[in-house]
Image (cartoon, grey):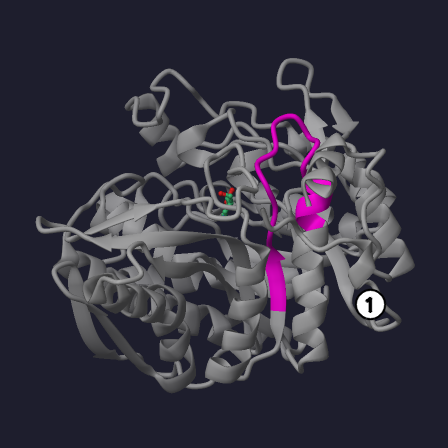
């Protein structure tokens, strides 16, 4: 058993710099409620794990945003990640909804007044329903379409000093939506996937141009879901080869495209491409890292030639969604980002599906320990945004998972503190990493005892 290291590790150096921002993260479709987009259609087609499930009213953040900003502040957050819902802004192709634009502007102004720096994602998985029918990502027309939307986003963001995330987890969208057909648009075609990935990179460039033109100075990047890959069989050369290829393709290729202007993906048997992305060179001011877990890869004899599994070699117990708890991987990836890309980092997501609520503080402690260690070793991390402020709609898994610092009663929509709130507050406000109190969190007591 290798528990997360506890209080014994804490020394003088365990202090977050004064400029470091703690915050929370959300995404429009998962929290706002009553959005008609491609995911709502997907749900009606019965394509979630539980086919009858619907996002519906979400957790009513559209109406409760003032309360939610106050919740964020109550745990010491100084930054709030949200996303603009394209389907609200452009419900019909080419017709922008001024009321939605005003509503978003008003929410962001209010967020700033509440003392929260806005972190704004332009694209977080969802699309207006017309998008896949008229200008899907695999067609070049998708790029001017996104540019027109981004032009409106620039109007919303002008003068707000927001940290901008053009795209959330492009590789998740690509794998889920274009290679495995599991999420909208439900395509499983390597050729179309690579065409789409190129256009998604071009859309980032177009959005950057629009934001720079309207807002002048802008701090802009993407949120990249990063996984640690490991060979399932230590002795098997093909498991090792897969691990290397996956790390390059999933974690780094897209980021490299936005730094060099050359998109190079090599996933043998799945998809490969080499494309020039005009204007993409040096188009990231920072990299947003979304880190959750590690996955083990095993070569299989039949297509797709790879099987992945979440193991638990340290006996820490999987998270409730079934992912390995592997905070060491967080430090490893942060150091890798520095050595591979040399960019400043924002942690734009990190968190645990903890349905009882007794393991979150310890999870945070493990990941913050790694984060501080990486920072001490020269990784320039500017802030940490916890996924999520509150429980929300978790895509294919619907209302099962609970990633929230605040638990939400999905019947009454009441928000309630989880035990981790006190710990988050203590570290975010004190700016010093301390160990969570075992009394506050039974899961911590269990692990400490086992250690
Ligand atoms: O809920 C998602 C989020 O939308 C994107 N990153 C991962 C989270 C947890 O699965």
Q: Secondary structure at mark 1?
A: loop
Mark count: 1
Residue at 36% from the left image edge and 70% from the top image edge: 254
Give coordinates of residue 12: x percent, y percent: 89, 71
Q: Say which quarter of the image contains residue 147.
A: bottom left
Residue at 34% from the left image edge and 19% from the top image edge: 51
Tell which of 358 and 285 is nearer to you.
358
Residue at 58% from the left image edge and 46% from the top image edge: 1
In the visual, does 14 lie left or right of 450?
Answer: right
In the visual, does 334 lie left or right of 431?
Answer: left
Q: How busy is the neighbourhood of tag 1: few (under 14 within 10 Å), some, or many (20 plus)? A: some
Above or below for 114 versus 339: above
Residue 167 in the magenta stretch? The answer is no
Above or below for 117 versus 186: below
Residue 272 seen anywhere in this rendered image of the structure: yes
Q: Which residue is mark 1?
A: 14
Give coordinates of residue 119: x percent, y percent: 65, 58
Q: Which residues are magenta?
A: 346-364
Q: Say which quarter of the image contains residue 17.
A: bottom right
Tell which of 327 and 55 is nearer to you.
327
Give coordinates of residue 286: x percent, y percent: 57, 75
Tell which of 123 and 432 is nearer to you.
432
Q: Cβ(mark 1) to ligand 1 < 8 Å?
A: no
Residue at 15% from the left image edge and 57% from the top image edge: 190
Above or below for 245 versus 407: below
Give coordinates of residue 305: x percent, y percent: 15, 53
In the visual, does 135 lie left or right of 251?
Answer: left
Residue 381 seen anywhere in this rendered image of the structure: no
């Amino acid at each position: 058993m290798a528990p997360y290291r506890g209080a014994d590790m804490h020394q003088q150096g365990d202090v977050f710099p004064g400029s470091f921002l703690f915050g929370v993260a959300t995404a429009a479709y998962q929290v706002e409620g009553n959005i008609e987009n491609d995911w709502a259609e997907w749900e009606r087609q019965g394509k979630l794990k539980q086919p009858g499930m619907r996002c519906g009213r979400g957790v009513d953040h559209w109406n409760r945003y003032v309360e939610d900003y106050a919740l964020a502040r109550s745990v010491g957050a100084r930054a709030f990640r949200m996303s603009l819902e394209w389907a609200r802004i452009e419900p019909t192709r080419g017709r922008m909804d001024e009321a939605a634009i005003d509503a978003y502007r008003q929410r962001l102004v209010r967020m700033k007044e509440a003392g929260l720096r806005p972190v704004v994602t332009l694209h977080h998985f969802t699309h207006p329903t017309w998008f896949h029918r008229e200008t899907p990502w695999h067609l070049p027309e998708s790029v001017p379409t996104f540019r027109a939307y981004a032009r409106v986003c620039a109007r919303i963001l002008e003068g707000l000093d927001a940290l901008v995330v053009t795209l959330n987890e492009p590789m998740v969208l690509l794998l889920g939506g274009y290679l495995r057909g599991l999420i909208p648009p439900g395509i499983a075609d390597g050729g179309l996937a690579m065409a789409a990935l190129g256009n998604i990179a071009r859309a980032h460039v177009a959005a950057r141009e629009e934001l720079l033109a309207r807002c002048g100075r802008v701090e802009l990047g993407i949120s990249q879901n990063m996984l640690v890959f490991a060979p399932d069989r230590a002795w098997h050369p093909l498991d090792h080869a897969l691990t290397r290829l996956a790390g390059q393709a999933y974690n780094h290729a897209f980021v490299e495209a936005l730094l060099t202007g050359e998109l190079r993906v090599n996933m043998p048997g799945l998809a490969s491409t080499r494309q020039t992305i005009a204007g993409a060179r040096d188009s990231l001011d920072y990299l947003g890292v979304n880190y959750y877990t590690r996955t083990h890869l095993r070569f299989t004899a039949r297509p797709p030639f790879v099987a992945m599994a979440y193991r638990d070699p340290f006996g820490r117990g999987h998270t409730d969604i079934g992912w390995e708890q592997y905070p060491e991987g967080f430090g490893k990836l942060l150091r890798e980002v520095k050595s591979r890309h040399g960019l400043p980092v924002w942690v734009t997501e990190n968190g645990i599906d903890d349905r009882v609520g007794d393991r979150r503080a310890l999870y945070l402690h493990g990941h913050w320990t790694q984060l501080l260690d990486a920072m001490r070793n020269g990784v320039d991390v500017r802030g940490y945004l916890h996924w999520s402020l509150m429980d929300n709609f978790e895509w294919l898994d619907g209302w099962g998972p609970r990633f929230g610092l605040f638990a939400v009663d999905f019947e009454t929509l009441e928000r309630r503190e989880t035990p981790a709130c006190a710990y988050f507050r203590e570290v975010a406000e004190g700016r010093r990493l301390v160990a969570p109190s075992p009394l506050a969190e039974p899961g911590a007591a269990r692990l400490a005892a086992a250690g």
